[in-house]
Image: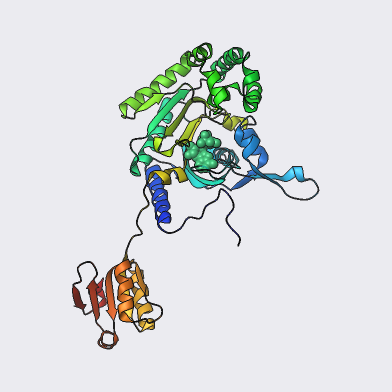
Amino acid sequence: MIKAQRGTKDIFGEESFLWQHILSNAQTVFQNAGFGEIKTPIFEATELFARGVGDSTDIVNKEMYTFSIGGADKSASSITLRPENTAGVVRAYIEHNISRQSPPQKFWYFGPMFRYERPQAGRQRQFNQVGVEMFGVEKASADAEVILSAVEFLKSLGLDNLSVELNSLGCKKCKNDYRENIKKVLAPYIADMCDDCKMRYEKNPLRILDCKNEDCQKILEKDEIKEIILKDYICEDCKTHFDELIEYLDELNIKYSINKLLVRGLDYYNRTVFEIKSEKLGSQSAVCGGGRYDGLVEMLGGPSTPAIGFAMGVERLCALIDNLEAPKLDYFIVSNNTKEAIKLASKLRNENKKVEFDYQSRKFAKQLEKASKSAKYAIILGEDEIEKGFYSVKNLENGEQKTISNFDDLI
Ligand code: ATP
Ligand code: MG
């Protein structure tokens, strides 16, 4: 038997109603907030992610599904299944000259992402993300709008008690000073840290701060290192930006905590970064990760454009919400005349009713049993009803039965 690939999942039955619910809430909440949907391709040039996600990240180093296609020159056409969607949206933003429209330009998306990871609860190889990207506004009002959208979307799903963690990474200049200080204080310990951290030390030392390795964690707990990590290092402008964001969040009654260890996995973030977590999810606790990436559009060849966004893991959202029950049919047609039954079903469906019938002319008792399990009403279409042109309708909740003489009354 051929089975689904490790780290992938089939979605059907009750779970599919949950997915539809999540998607339709995303559509409502984000579109109410002025985000338009964007669908970008599932595969892109490998180079887009190498540059756009950053070559010091776990994603680019270990997790990408990369294929070589084409003729003899395989390197010329290396493509990758998207591991995240910001790079793809930025590529589209540049390619379609969207920056020429008046800012802000706001997008939301929903779709599958692919990362070669060790599958476990809350971690798959094909998973789905719903997210937003907002371009063109440097002010903290944009950061507030994006965080508000995430919180409102979660609230619409009944998830209103999750914790928002915030940090500011600063701008290029303050990030560089910080990086140098971190490097200096870690220098005597780096030999004892994991191989990933050794690589990060060279390429992106801030990433060491969110290393999950226990030995590395222990080193980061040392007083002299903690002191440097927790120091307020961001410049005046970055501090003003962060303070303004906090004023907005207070004004909006959004609860947050500041976590100086929050650096986020992607290379391109600056200033605001945030995560939304739930203890219910255990070790895979983050449902949402986001941040500002003011340099990315320019770095990928577009005009200098401030931007901020977030992505949420749909499977992790599902884990936080109970499955929804399948909505009941409006009518189940009980009949031994399948042709009349299918005609009536079609007429009712055109009136936007949910309708099923029996396809095999089984005994009425069997059909009624099926009806009472799945529908609000049974419409009984026996020989008499068909001949004289009326409907016998049974309320399956209270057992009441009525005779209805024409189709309009039935509706
Ligand atoms: P993690 O630290 O859990 O690996 P990440 O920093 O790699 O997360 P992001 O790239 O920020 O995650 O993606 C945003 C969200 O997408 C995460 O908060 C999580 O909910 C979800 N996500 C990321 N990777 C996976 C995965 N392999 N399976 C399921 N959901 C995922
Ligand atoms: Mg990850």
Residue 16 x %, y %: 43, 55
Q: Position of residue 29 (x, y in %)?
A: 37, 43
Q: How many numbered callouts?
A: 0
Q: Give how far across and how far down residue 266 sits, in percent.
A: 56, 31
Question: Which colour scheme appears in the figure?
Answer: rainbow
Which residue corresponds to the image point at 55% horizontal and 15% vertical from the top-left? 178
**Where on the picture, by quarter, is residue 374?**
bottom left
Q: In which quarter of the image is ligand 2?
A: top right
Q: Which of 73 and 280 is in front in this view?
A: 280
Residue 280 in sight here: yes
Residue 321 placement, left or right of 98: left
Name above or below for residue 130 compared with residue 398. above
Residue 135 appears in the figure: no
Please state, as top left, top right, bottom left or bottom right, where the C terminus lies in the image: bottom left
Give the side of residue 273 with respect to residue 302, left or right. left
Q: Which residue lies furthest to the right in this view?
A: 72
Image coordinates of residue 375 in percent, x first then y, are 30, 67
Question: Quarter of the image holding residue 393?
Answer: bottom left
Q: Quadrant of the N terminus?
A: bottom right
Q: Is residue 41 above or below residue 401?
A: above
**Residue in the foreground of this view, choosing between 336 and 253:** 336
Residue in front for this viewpoint, 278 or 169: 278
Q: Is residue 362 above or below residue 292?
A: below
